Image (spheres, rainbow, N blue to C red):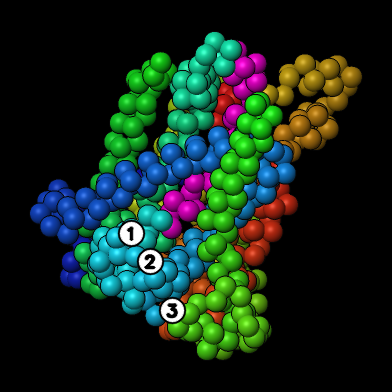
Amino acid sequence: MSGPQFRRTSPQFRRTSPQFRPQVTGTQPSQWVGGRNYATILADPEFWLSLRISLIFAAVVVSLTLITGTLVGLLLNRLGPRMAAFVSTSALLAWATPAVSASVIFFWLFDPDGGIVDWTLSKMPHWLVGSTNWAGFNWTTAALPAYTLLTLLVVWQSFPFVAVTVLAGLKTIPAELHESARVDGAGPWRAFWKITYPLLKPIFLVLLLLSIIWDFGVFTQAYLITGALGNRDEYNLGIYAYAKAFQLPPNYGLAGALAVILTVVLLMITVGYVRVRTAGGDGVTGPRLARALRRIALNGCGAAVAAVTLLPIFWMISTAFKPRREIFSLTPHPLPAHPTLANFANVISGKVIGISYWTFFRNSLLVTVASVVLASLISLLAAVGVARFRFRFRTSYLIMLLIVQMLPQQALVIALFIDFRSVNLLDSLTGLIVVYTSFALPISIWMLRNFVATVPRELEEAAAIDGAGPARIFWRILFPLVAPGLVATSVFSFIFAWNEFIFALTFLGLDQPKFTLPLYVNYFFGRGGAAWGSIMAASITYTLPPVVFFLLVRRRMRGGLVAGAVKG
């Protein structure tokens, strides 16, 4: 895992203009240029614009995600079991939706020619939505509306994870604590800051850290919403670095320096946020009818949350079954009047790209399953070693896992591209398996370590006294007790491998028979033009497997979220 970090710090000091590019590819000796690449970047106005956009976007999205997710988590804790299960499952469907599919769905919702958002805003009174002519308004041609759309998209996908994690943490708080606080006259706000927040602070810190990492490093959604590498005024830092590396003429030296800057900025922001949070202390210090009304209000809020999270998914499904004339009707209709399977037939046949859909499905399934199996096996063995044995640099190793997890994909893709080209792993599914496995390992090892640590040593010692060897103890005692954690970590590995876009886009190039489904949907989206029915059908076929997988393991996943955040 440390190899790419060393490689990333190398191209930045090399000459990489066209006449010197062989020095990066290895066909000529390297020439040291000191900090010239950094000086070039710092003198570029586009860098400062992209940095400002990234910082503002991360601050807004992280805040909205944590606030929304916490409020929804508190709401879920007050709902009845059935309603809470319905709302949480509805919300997590948004989290399980691949980033490529979610981006395409929101692009269609905000499309100026037939999108439901522009139509809805144009029907509202001006005093409510302003004097802008919303009919035909294009959300992607300028930075402010584009990042408004992007903020809604990222928050929609991110807050369910926060909500369910907070809910799982709330279930661990004894009810007697809140009852005592109510008896003492504490209101909901004071009870939250005096009881809930201090007890869940470890979970909030983990969620804060993960939100910063994920939101500051947003690439896939920004890449698709802003039109790939088109409008430079809409570049965030990740897209700016990617453009420097892979747009003609490519400049790996500048891109390598940008990757280091991106990583340093993210580390500084993370450390600053966490220090502020940890230094802030524990925070600021007729009955049957009332209960019925409160229950109705809570259920109404829960239904509203479910509706907001399910609307984009519902509109995707509805559009996929509509014929073209209904899709572009002047008045959008929620359900198709004349349902058709023609859009799915167009996708499955692969007419757009000339290759069967099942080729891309097989590629994605192969890469995902191989990555999950490898990551689960390696992380389980590593977690047992870290949890059960004391060795030199053990703490340093655990810290390194967190640091590696904090590094954004855009910061590593350049160095890995150079490395993989030197060992002939470009245009190869094997290369993707290696990358996906390595990216899944840090969080898998960290979470599984906490599960292993909760297994009493006395069980293993009793089995050893009865004559069981290490292998038998592992498979008969440890493995069954750690299995729920293995399921929880496999969810993260599966969703990451199935949804991943930037490495597949970079490493597979133009070798279309090796494309995974995210690239197929992106290709379909780019070439499909206004064929929104087929585009939504392609998004459904891509979204369905991770959603089904998530629904099968969602119960076990909740326990893994809490164990990974609180234990150890």
Q: Is residue 206 above or below residue 465?
A: below
- Looking at the image, which residue is at 52% across and 56% down? 308
Residue kind at label 3, given as amino acid type:
Gly
Residue 199 pos. (x, y %): 53, 21
Is residue 441 among what the camera can see?
no
Element type at mark 3:
loop
Which label sits on residue 124? Answer: 2
Q: Earlier in the sequence, mark 3 or mark 2?
A: 3
Which label sits on residue 114? Answer: 3
Residue kind at label 1, given as amino acid type:
Leu
Which label sits on residue 549? Answer: none
Q: Nearer the viewer, mark 3 or mark 2?
A: 2
Q: Are marks 1 and 3 in contact (CB under 8 Å)?
A: no
Residue kind at label 2, given as amino acid type:
Met
Q: Is residue 172 magenta?
A: yes
**Residue 535 or residue 506, whichever sits in front:** 535
Q: Is residue 277 magenta?
A: no
Residue 13 pos. (x, y %): 21, 51
Q: Magenta part of the protein: which range?
A: 153-180
Is residue 294 among what the camera can see?
yes
Q: Are marks 2 and 1 in contact (CB under 8 Å)?
A: yes
Residue marked by disc 1:
128
